Each structure stands twice: as C-alpha cells, then as structure tokens.
Amino acid sequence: MLNKSQIALCLEEMEKMFPDAHCELHHTTPFELTIAVLLSAQCTDALVNKVTPALFAKYKTPEDYLSVSLEELQDDIRSIGLYRNKAKNIQKLAELVIKEYSGSIPQDRDELTKLPGVGRKTANVVVSVAFGVPAIAVDTHVERVSKRLGICRWKDSVLTVEETLMKKIPRHLWSATHHRLIFFGRYHCKAQNPNCRECPLLSLCREGKKRMKDKL
DNA sequence: CTCCCGATAT
DNA sequence: ATATCAGGAG
C-alpha cells in the first residue's frame, strides 16, 4: 500500500501529464451539470456531450422537463443508453427540485443524494464542480487507478476508496486530484491494455510492476 | 446481487 | 464478439 508521500509523488506526475484536467461534461449551470452527470452513468462523456446541446436548448428549467411526456424525453436521450431509468429519474428530479428546493439545485451533498438518479458519486461531482466544495468523486476511472497503484485494496468498496483518498490527500487538493485521477485513468491508465511500459508511475505502481513481470 | 442499455473501442 | 463507459436503484 502506498503511503502519503508516495501518493503525493503519483499526483505530481499526473499533474505533469494532465495539467489542465477538468470536468469534460458541457454545462452552463448547476442544474445542467446535474442532468449531464446523471446522464453520464455507464456511458462516455463524449456521448453525453453529443445530446446535451439539443437537450439543454429544448429544456431550460425543471418545469420544461415536466411539460413533455415520458416517451418524448426518452426519445431525446435514447442514444445515451439506460434511457428509461434516466428519463424517469429526470422528471422525478425536476418535480422534487420545484417542490422541495424552490426550483434550484441544492448545494449540500446529502440533499443532492435525495434526488432520484443522484448517488454519492454524482453528488460529489456537482458540489465540487458547480459549488467549489472539496470532494473526490469515485467513478470507474478513479476506482481502477487507485486500486492498480495500490492506494487502496482491490476488494475495497467505492466508499472506502473515497475515504482512503480523503484521508491521504490534503483537502485543498481533493477537487484537482479527482480530475487528474480521471484524466490519468481515461487517457493513460485505461481499463483495457494499459501502457505500463511507458508509464512514468511504473516504479510506484503495484499492478504495473506485476504486469511487467508477467509480460502483459 | 441484478437490472438497466446504446455507442464505441478492441 | 466482447469489454467498457464520470452509476444508481431495487
């Protein structure tokens, strides 16, 4: 398992590789960001960004999402996948935002989690990106990279991964770190065939050294 | 744990 | 053909 200073070294290397790591989901308001992140479950950011321009032009307020039938909203997001659940969640979310939060997305992580389709990961992205609250959203990339490097254990839950990262990384670096981990995972330490041979983190990486030994 | 699910990369 | 993608709910 990596200690704090080893993790700090990893983060420095990631910063060199991806100095401008940022949220890649297109949005202009906290409400749009929440919808975009909800849509991004089990689907690439690039695909979400293909539907949101037309979506956000058509639906600007929570009321707009409730002004059409469920079937029409499904059709507008069909190419994303999981569209039945997502369309239903968006309409319920819109209803709740109007009734319980007077039309605007709550800024509190635990309040956000009460919205349908919004779990801990999505809530962390929203508070971090839209409201500037330090948070580490653990998505598939952050989980994979943390486990490969040896920041946490393979059997750890996503919540344990998040807690470990928060414990071992200074709070003021949480949000920047979360984006660097995502870029590192998305563009370099990929799920399939990671290029460990040319990885600057190889000397620190548990999985990388193992893969080199096994000639993967 | 399973289900939801289309697009894309390998 | 199969794996994966900024997960969440039942």
Image (tube, coloured by chain):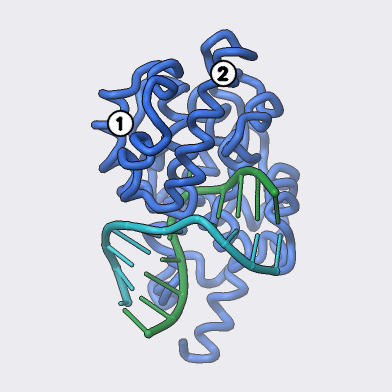
Chain colours: A blue, B cyan, C green
Q: Amino acid at mark 2?
A: Val
Name the residue nearer the viewer: A121 or A189: A121
Query: Image check: A188 left or right of B9?
Result: right
Q: Relative to A124, is A144 above or below?
A: below
| Residue drawn at x 66%, y 66% as measured from the top left | A150
x and y percentages locating residue A173 in the rendered image: 59, 36
Q: What residue did someone put label 2 on?
A: A97
Note whether residue A138 is visible: yes
| Residue drawn at x 52%, y 13% as measured from the top left | A104
x and y percentages locating residue A7 in the rendered image: 63, 54
Q: Relative to A77, is A209 above or below?
A: below
Under circle 1, the secondary element is helix
x and y percentages locating residue A156 in the rendered image: 74, 62
Question: The N terminus of chain A appears in which quarter of the rendering?
Answer: bottom right
| Residue drawn at x 34%, y 23% as measured from the top left | A59
Name the residue nearer the viewer: A44 or A103: A103
Q: Earlier in the sequence, mark 2 or mark 1?
A: 1
Please state the total of marks drawn on the protein image.
2
Disc assigned to residue A102: none
